[in-house]
Image: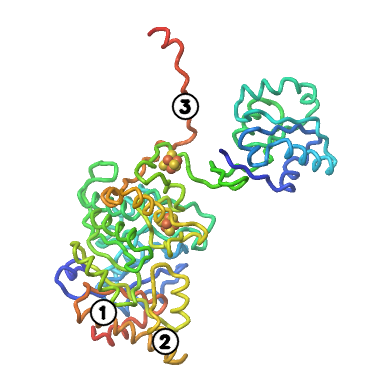
Amino acid sequence: MIITKKRDFQELMENIKNYKSFFLIGCSECASLCGTGNQEAIDALTEALKAEGKEVEGGFVAKTGCQVLGTKTELKPFKEALDKTECILVMSCGAGTQAAVEIFEDKPVYATNDSLFLGNMTRFQFFDERCSLCGKCILDKTGGICPITACPKGILNGPCGGCKDGKCEVSPDIKCAWVRIYERMKKLDRLQDLCDNALEAKDWSSSIKPRTLVTRPDKKEEKKK
Amino acid sequence: MSFKDILSSGKFVVTAEVGPPKGTDIKEMIHHIELLKGKVDALNVTDNQSAVMRICSMAVCKICLEHGVEPILQMTCRDRNRIGLQSDLLGASILNIKNVLCMTGDHVLAGDHKQAKPVYDVESVQLLGVVNSLNNGKDMAGNDLKGSTDFFQGAVVTPEANPLEPQLIKFEKKVRAGARFFQTQAIYDINKFKDFMKYAKKFPVKILAGIVVLKSAGMANFINNNVPGIRVPQELIDELKAAGKEKALDTGLNIAARHIKQLKEENICDGVHIMAIGMEDKVPTIMERAGLL
Ligand code: SF4
Ligand code: SF4
């Protein structure tokens, strides 16, 4: 899921200082699990804004905030409140914020969260980054541990000289990704693989931005068949 | 004779290191280069060591050549992508820089520009492959070069890494990627180093043992607690302590000289790499005491 963190309130107030009335859009997916876009978060921000003398015309938790059409449909019942609103606040990730930008062509839209990374939830509201969405997965060669993400240098043939007692050069709180890979490959009895096959430099052209993807079969093509 | 030829001649080789300064005043650095001229077989020029921004390695390598000292261009992957690295390698080649040491490089968080974007488009093993490829007239993308390079390429290894086996797997990858010589992380336990050499001798590469002078017992303890892959044995710490504050540095120089002498006399490795770290002027003293001058 996409991990988000609430932005500093004073910073948010500075961004929206020119507006008086707001509508808040949360998200039931990642942002709810992060506690940044659920109903409680909306209620808390509503209170905080009111305490600063702002008006909150309404708000709701979108099913999937990054889904443009779905969110647009979900917003229909709120037309009256939205008409009175000067500014939209989006309480999900950067993708959700930009869905709102697309929906509200002539209203300012602001993000209340910073979007951090694609994360795993290891315990309730504890998040870890494990995949950087590189576009060409190499997990099959590294025992299922991603060095592009777990190693701060993204080294494909590690460990580097900075590894100290199995810990990463960058922080003693991180276990060296390449020691983890080594240990796992050893358990899987695949050490020979690791020794024999130096990984080649990555082809970064698979992650040139912005990326798009269409998975829906082309109806016309289907009919022709 | 070139560094490469000296190494293959079987002579016990000595390399040292010069760290380019931050800023354009290079008087002191030139003094160090002059001091080591004719004494060491080659001088490593560090590449923004510890991720602290300084004069680039290539410019200082050129200055070494002008002063009659053969340079070893250290090249890290932290600050340049594959286009920058290859372009700099071609540039170094036309400046007559013959030796290149391929390293991944300390993370930007270790240095003085923590906000920088770390690059690491390739890393040390892959960079060795790149040098190999340029030597064979092709760039990384397989395009033909108009004139190839003729580098003598090396790498680094940590004989006392903990855990050791992943480090050795990487060492072998470096050998297969074309490394011809290795300079090791500092070593202080000659017996342990002998074990490493027993293993390393199986490979067709030259090994220069890393020597770092201990200035005091405090420095030795600091290394043990903070520097990855280096272990100063307790006897050496005791020896430095016993020498007292006044004599500690002199004792440190003696230890370095003694180690070098043993490495040479017992034919343990192919040479040494002395990292003086701010005490470049002491390198000749160490060499003298080791019987190398
Ligand atoms: S290699 Fe790593 S970053 Fe790339 S897709 Fe696989 S897990 Fe994600
Ligand atoms: S210590 Fe390990 S995880 Fe950390 S940068 Fe080096 S190789 Fe990567």
**Residue closest to the eye, B84 or B233:** B233
- Residue placed under numbered mark 2 in the picture: B238
Q: Nearer the viewer, mark 1 or mark 2?
A: 2
Q: Is residue A170 above or below residue A117?
A: below
User: In the orientation shown, which residue stands out farthest toward the top?
Assistant: A224
- Is the residue marked 3 within 8 Å of ligand 1, measured from its CB? no
- Residue placed under numbered mark 1 in the picture: B39
**What chain does mark 3 sit on?**
A
| Quadrant occupied by the C terminus of chain A | top left
Q: Residues within 10 Å of mark 2 (few under 14, many from 20)?
A: few
Amino acid of disc 2: Asp
Discs 1 and 2 carry the same chain letter: yes
Q: Is residue B234 left or right of residue A50?
A: left
Q: Secondary structure at mark 3?
A: loop
User: In the orientation shown, which residue stands out farthest toward the left?
Assistant: B9
Whichever of labels 1 and 2 marks the residue nearer the N terminus, that label is 1
Q: CA distance from mark 2 to mark 3?
A: 65 Å
Instruction: Give the residue at x 30% y 71%.
Output: B43
Q: Is residue B20 left or right of residue A119?
A: left
Q: Residues within 10 Å of mark 1 (few under 14, many from 20)?
A: some
Q: Is residue B17 above or below residue A128?
A: below
Q: Position of residue B2 (x, y in %)?
A: 19, 68
Q: Position of residue A115 (x, y in %)?
A: 60, 42
Q: Position of residue A68 (x, y in %)?
A: 61, 25
**What chain does mark 2 sit on?**
B
- Residue placed under numbered mark 3 in the picture: A213
* Image quadrant in which you'd find residue A137: top left
Disc 1, disc 2: CB below 8 Å? no
Q: CA distance from mark 3 to mark 1?
A: 62 Å
Q: Is residue A70 above or below residue A210?
A: above
Q: Nearer the viewer, mark 2 or mark 3?
A: 2
